[in-house]
Image (spheres, grey):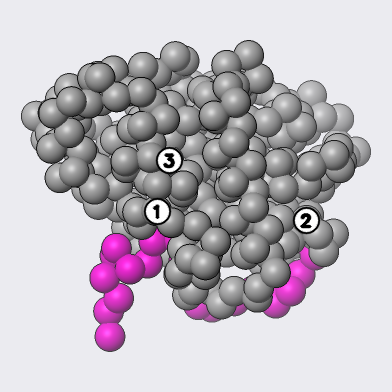
Amino acid sequence: MTIPEADLDGRVIFYEAAPPLGRSKRILHVNGVASDVAKQHRDLETLVWLTLERPFDVMGIHNSTQGIQADLTESLLGKAELYRFWPEHRLASSQKRLSSYAEILRSLCDQSLAPDADILAAAKGSVKGLPSLDMDLLRRLTSLSSLSWDDLENTLYGMYPAGAPRPTLRLAYEIATALRTGAEVYVVAHSQGLIITALALHIVQQFFGDYSKWAQTLRVIGYGPAIMFEDLPAPARLQAILIQHRQDHVAESFSNLRNVNLWNNLQNQARNLVERADSLIQIIGTDSHHSASLYLGLTGDPAGDRSAKLIQQLLLGNWDDDPVIQSLRSTRIIIEGSH
């Protein structure tokens, strides 16, 4: 029986030939925009083969796609919340929401969740909110321009994280539980998956509170990144390396969004996304410079092959002792196209 794409949101999936075995090193992969479960299974299989020399537990946190318009709107909303978590822009209301997310995570960590568990159902006793972005509701908000960001977020998500709440909370849960067992955790994420990763890491940092070494065994490898380093909590920035193709205009546009005043113009953004759907599909399609298949070396493009080789080196290398990896931390590496 085939499970609908929407029902897979936030579930843990893996390459069937290489199920998790409780290894001390694990990859948590988060897919990006317009990536259905079949594409993520392809990416997980690729990561298994890239690390065959030193096997990891390779697990995918599925970020289900509702279509280009919804995925990009989720990304914009997630970016808006990330901006509110920057220390210089964090208000009491943003800190209150972040603290509430950490409380949700605390309640989840008291449970042992199955891979196919609905993360929001598991959190139901402690919080109320909407399970996913309701584009129809968004379009009906005729007074959107007069709403504050807090009102908008409460209307769209209740007390769940903005953007993609299920994969965000599931990733936070998997990171926190793995770090507590002493595992070395590699979050490997593409596109919108980096926005989800950044939000999840803010929640994890809040969860660990005063424990400053929580990110010591964390590694973040992002390709086609839709974030800036400033979007990550400070301890995670030192553990992150981002890879971007020179001609990846989607990553360039999203990562450079700073003060995203979505609470003033989100309705226009949604309308524009609908109108531009065809061109956006072409940009994010499998032959674009933003596609996961390119970064993982699946297209035959020389730049993509170099990207895949770099990802492999970062996965197999020693982040504590390798001087090359040490020098690349907190760096956005630009992959040049063919000449």
Check the image and report above or below for 219 versus 16.
Answer: above
Residue range in magenta is: 1-27
Please state which amino acid type lies under the numbered disc 1: Gly
Please state which amino acid type lies under the numbered disc 2: Leu
Please state which amino acid type lies under the numbered disc 3: Ala
Visible in this render: residue 235? yes
Kind of element beneath mark 3: loop
Residue 232's image quarter?
top right
Check the image and report above or below for 29 versus 253.
Answer: below
Q: CA distance from mark 1 to mark 2?
A: 28 Å
Can you identify the residue that label 3 sits on?
A: 162
Can you identify the residue that label 1 sits on?
A: 129
Mark 1 or mark 3: whose residue is earlier in sequence? 1
Residue sitting at x 39%, y 26%? 149
Magenta stretch encompasses residue 26: yes
Kind of element beneath mark 2: helix
Mark 2 or mark 3: whose residue is earlier in sequence? 3
Contact, mark 1 vs mark 2 (Cβ under 8 Å): no
Question: Furthest residue to the right?
Answer: 321
Q: Quadrant of the C terminus?
A: top left
Can you identify the residue that label 2 sits on?
A: 179
Magenta stretch encompasses residue 325: no
In the shown orientation, is residue 285 left or right of residue 55? left
Crowd around label 2: few <14 · some 14–19 · many ≥20 (10 Å):
some
Contact, mark 2 vs mark 3 (Cβ under 8 Å): no
Kind of element beneath mark 1: loop
Q: Quadrant of the N terminus?
A: bottom left
Contact, mark 1 vs mark 3 (Cβ under 8 Å): no
Where does residue 151 sit, x and y in percent of width and height?
A: 36, 32
In the shown orientation, is residue 321 left or right of residue 289? right
Q: Nearer the viewer, residue 23 or 51?
A: 23
